[in-house]
Image: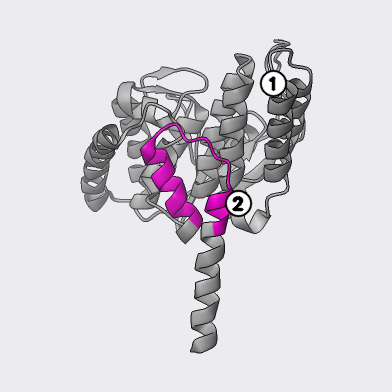
Amino acid sequence: MRMKALFFTLLFFFSFQLLAQSDYHFHSDIEKNVIDQYILEGKTKTLELQLIADENVTTNSLNTYGQTFDMLLIDLKKKKLTAKSDQRFLSWMFYKVHRKALKNYEQYTTLATTLDNGKYDCLSATTLYALLLNELNYKPEVIETNYHIYLFVTTEEGRFLIESTDPITGFVYDEKEIALRTELKELDVNTESTYLFKAQLNSLVTLTKLAGLQYYNKAVFHYNQQDLKSTLNLLEKASLFYHSQRITEFGIVLANAIAVDQTLNQTDKNHAMSRIRSFLKMDDAMASR
């Protein structure tokens, strides 16, 4: 018993040390509180975790987003009780959520914006579906590729694909059609100022990792706006939740951009490089909790 008590005492101590040594730049108190809780306990409320990447989220608005989410969930739970099959319910759910919550596609949209005014992209919409399905006791499998993200739901009836950015034919139950939909395809983008991820991805991601991708998308947006300071702040927190190949690649790109930036003095550059080196070395066990 003494050894067990000593173990948890040391764990608690080193968790505080990690908090003390971290150089995270928080944009709100709610973001700080959620991330501090995650570092100390390895968990936090699922919806909150997906919302905090948006700098406009406050304690008050967090409650509003929670109410919006709960109202949508209540309708889905009622329908599930009377549904004759998973396929019928999931199909109904897909189109119901699109009609109710997903209004207009816009790249680099946060989940908070989606809940607020219906603007969405593949990440924010897929995250919304994943959260709802999780609450409905399904086990969504979210798949990340280079420039897209979608999810599967598997039940006793079979496997179903949810393609959140396709409001017309985005619910797929035919295996041949699923295979065609999920083939890796290159994205044809010619904008030189836009950061493009190079490595090939086709990976299963958890809800926690989705939070990291929320931060990553925000980092890419700010990088494309040539706001390197915000990019660093966001990418550092993205690495906390999802220390992935794309984080490493983007960290190197960011370091090169900072090195040649004429608006930063050498002291600021050295500090930024130190922060990048720190999160690129982060233990995967910490980032994958």
Select label 1 or label 2 by which is in front: 2
Mark 1 or mark 2, which has the lower sequence index?
1
> Start and end of the magenta stretch?
17-39
The disc at residue 195 is 1
Q: Quadrant of residue 190?
A: top right
Res. 192 image quadrant? top right
Could you tell me residue 180's position as x and y percent? Answer: 64, 33
Residue 32 vertical placement versus 117 (above, below): below
Residue type indicated by callout 2: Ala
213 or 253: nearer the eye? 253
Determine if residue 165 is in view: yes
Q: Main secondary structure of the magenta part?
A: helix
Q: In the depicted view, which residue is nearer to us: 182 or 235?
A: 235
Point 63% across, 15% down: residue: 226
Residue to which mark 2 is pinned = 287
Q: CA distance from mark 1 to mark 2?
A: 23 Å
Provide the secondary structure element on which disc 1 rests.
loop
Q: Nearer the viewer, residue 263 or 247?
A: 263
